[in-house]
């Protein structure tokens, strides 16, 4: 029995009370720990460090957000607003240099000192290699277009290109060749010590919208005064806006050093052929035919039996190619060609209309086939965009694809054609596309049956190609977003089966129609 009068017994009682209190607290802690562990398990996904957005991921999200804006002005305002949210967002935006390029400057008459400083600050956010500047001049009435009114005849614009930050790419969009002439005059007058951005460009793009008055489109002096670059883009006005270009003195060294050229021209004369013939070291060529349905330099070359030999070109891109000018494929001699990208989309149109998407002419199939037969250039990549294959001609398209035996990548984008094409390609007697690794069918109409592609893939899996397994590893089917149907549900099971059974990645998506691809 405890004697409370005994000091020793009193101490034992106090110890017992403390132990009980410690036990109670320990039990409470244990219960709370168990509760915490339960909450952590329940919300483990939400608290995972994998969900914390890194600066790189934030930068990609910002870039995707800005791409939703069609106007650069609104995109710039949105980017600045993102930088004001918090320090982390601002740091992520500053670390993503591609958000700050290209910088587009619209000049009406003169650049203000404030605009000059803003341009320099904006460009400083991006790396030199990705730093892109686009300068546009206003389309002023011709009678008011004089040096003192021209936006390019501006000392601050010249200063930006001689004393400003080094640029990777410069694009000048003006109405007349005289506009650029005024600017080059200022650039040659203002020669500061040290390197000039104008002379250190990697890529240059020039766009001229109109001719001036009744004079011929005098581009000769401009070509002779350009800085040497590796990538050059020249967009001349359509022939409906210019009568002729005078005989040109082609700066051979300038064009001989080019590795990539974009030429937008539909003139019915030798000028485009002369320019192309000088590009002896060209590797990538893009020709924009401006959707012209009349005679161009293509017919000029055919009549004169002229051809252009470009021995190093491995990639040819044809834009806004009207069927009337499909013979451009016969104008070039391209022994090293392995990638062909043809876009027959004429203009921005709604998907519900066939306007702007023209029928692939019969000659196209023969001309592409001749690239391999005559030039020994075995195409490995083929992309066809914005065209129509009539239902009664699907067998021609199927036969064409069946003969492209060396293709490793095939992309059919925004082309209306029958899925019976793949029914023919999946026949037991067909060994078509034996080297195909990637198949992309984009912007498909609802009438296109994916089950035909299913049969095509299954037949390939049961066939031996060159003594080995089927090289096909990726299939993409993208249906137009405004359309849907049971095909999407059917292909969900197809996708799982092919991934598990054949190790083929079949991607089935819907996407918004893009009337014209870059």
Image: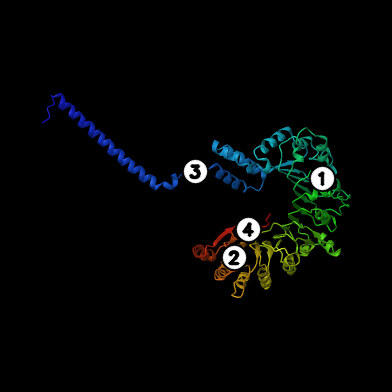
Q: Is residue 86 visible?
A: no
Residue 74: % across, % down: 64, 43
Of labels 3 and 4, the one closer to you: 3
Residue 118: % across, % down: 68, 35
Residue at image mark 2: 446
Residue 115 numbered tag: none
Residue 141 numbered tag: 1
Residue nearest the observer in this picture, 336 or 145: 336
What is the CA distance from the residue labelled 4 to the residue labelled 2? Answer: 13 Å
What is the CA distance from the residue labelled 4 to the residue labelled 1? Answer: 36 Å
**Sequence-first tag of 1 and 3:** 3
Callouts 3 and 4 close, C-beta under 8 Å = no
Residue at image mark 3: 52
Residue 303: % across, % down: 85, 64
What is the CA distance from the residue labelled 1 to the residue labelled 3? Answer: 55 Å
Residue at image mark 4: 513
**Sequence-first tag of 4 and 2:** 2
Of labels 2 and 1, the one closer to you: 2
**Sequence-first tag of 2 and 1:** 1
Of labels 1 and 3, the one closer to you: 3
Task: Check disc 4: other Cα within 10 Å, few if <14, some if 14-19, many if 20+.
Answer: some
What is the CA distance from the residue labelled 2 to the residue labelled 3? Answer: 39 Å
SS of the residue under disc 4: loop
> How many discs appear?
4
SS of the residue under disc 1: loop
Q: Residue at x 71, y 64 (%)?
A: 358
């Amino acid at each position: 029995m405890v004697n409370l009068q005994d000091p020793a017994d009193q101490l034992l009682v106090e110890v017992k009370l403390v132990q009980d209190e410690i036990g109670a607290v320990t039990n409470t802690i244990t219960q709370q720990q168990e509760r915490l562990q339960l909450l952590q398990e329940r919300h483990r996904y939400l608290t995972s460090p994998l969900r914390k957005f890194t600066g790189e991921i934030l930068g990609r999200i910002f870039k995707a957000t800005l791409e939703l804006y069609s106007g650069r002005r609104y995109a710039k305002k949105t980017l600045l607003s993102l930088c004001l949210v918090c320090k982390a967002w601002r740091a992520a935006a500053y670390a993503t240099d591609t958000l700050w390029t290209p910088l587009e400057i619209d000049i009406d008459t003169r650049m203000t000192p404030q605009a000059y400083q803003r341009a320099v600050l904006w460009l400083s956010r991006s790396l030199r290699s990705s730093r892109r500047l686009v300068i546009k001049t206003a389309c002023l009435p011709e009678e008011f277009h004089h040096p003192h009114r021209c936006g390019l005849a501006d000392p601050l614009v010249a200063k930006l290109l001689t004393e400003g930050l080094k640029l990777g790419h410069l694009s000048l969009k003006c109405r007349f060749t005289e506009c650029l002439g005024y600017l080059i005059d200022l650039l040659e007058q203002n020669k500061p010590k040290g390197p000039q951005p104008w002379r250190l460009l990697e890529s240059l793009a020039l766009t001229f919208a109109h001719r001036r008055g009744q004079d011929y489109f005098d581009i000769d002096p401009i070509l002779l005064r350009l800085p040497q670059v590796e990538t050059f883009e020249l967009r001349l006005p359509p022939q409906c806006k210019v009568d002729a270009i005078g005989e040109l003195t082609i700066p051979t060294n300038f064009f001989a050093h080019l590795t990539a050229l974009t030429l937008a021209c539909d003139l019915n004369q030798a000028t485009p052929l002369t320019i192309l013939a000088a590009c002896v070291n060209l590797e990538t060529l893009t020709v924009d035919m401006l959707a012209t349905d009349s005679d161009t330099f293509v017919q000029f070359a055919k009549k004169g039996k002229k051809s252009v030999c470009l021995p190093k070109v491995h990639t040819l891109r044809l834009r806004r190619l009207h069927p009337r000018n499909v013979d451009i494929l016969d104008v070039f001699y391209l022994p090293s060609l392995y990638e062909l990208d043809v876009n027959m989309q004429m203009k921005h149109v709604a998907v519900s209309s066939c306007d702007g998407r023209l029928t692939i002419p019969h000659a196209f199939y023969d001309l592409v086939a001749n690239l391999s037969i005559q030039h020994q250039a075995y195409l490995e990549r083929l992309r066809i965009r914005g065209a129509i294959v009539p239902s009664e001609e699907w067998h021609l398209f199927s036969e064409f694809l069946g003969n492209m035996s060396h293709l490793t990548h095939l992309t059919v984008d925004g082309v209306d054609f029958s899925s019976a094409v793949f029914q023919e390609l999946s026949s037991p007697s067909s060994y078509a596309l034996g080297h195909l690794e990637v198949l992309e069918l984009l912007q498909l109409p609802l009438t296109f049956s994916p089950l035909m592609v299913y049969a095509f893939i299954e037949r390939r899996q049961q066939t031996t190609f060159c003594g080995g397994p089927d090289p096909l590893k990726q299939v993409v089917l993208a249906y137009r977003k405004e359309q849907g149907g049971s095909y999407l549900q059917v292909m969900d099971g197809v996708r799982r089966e092919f991934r598990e059974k054949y190790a083929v990645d079949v991607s089935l998506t819907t996407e918004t129609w893009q009337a014209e691809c870059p």
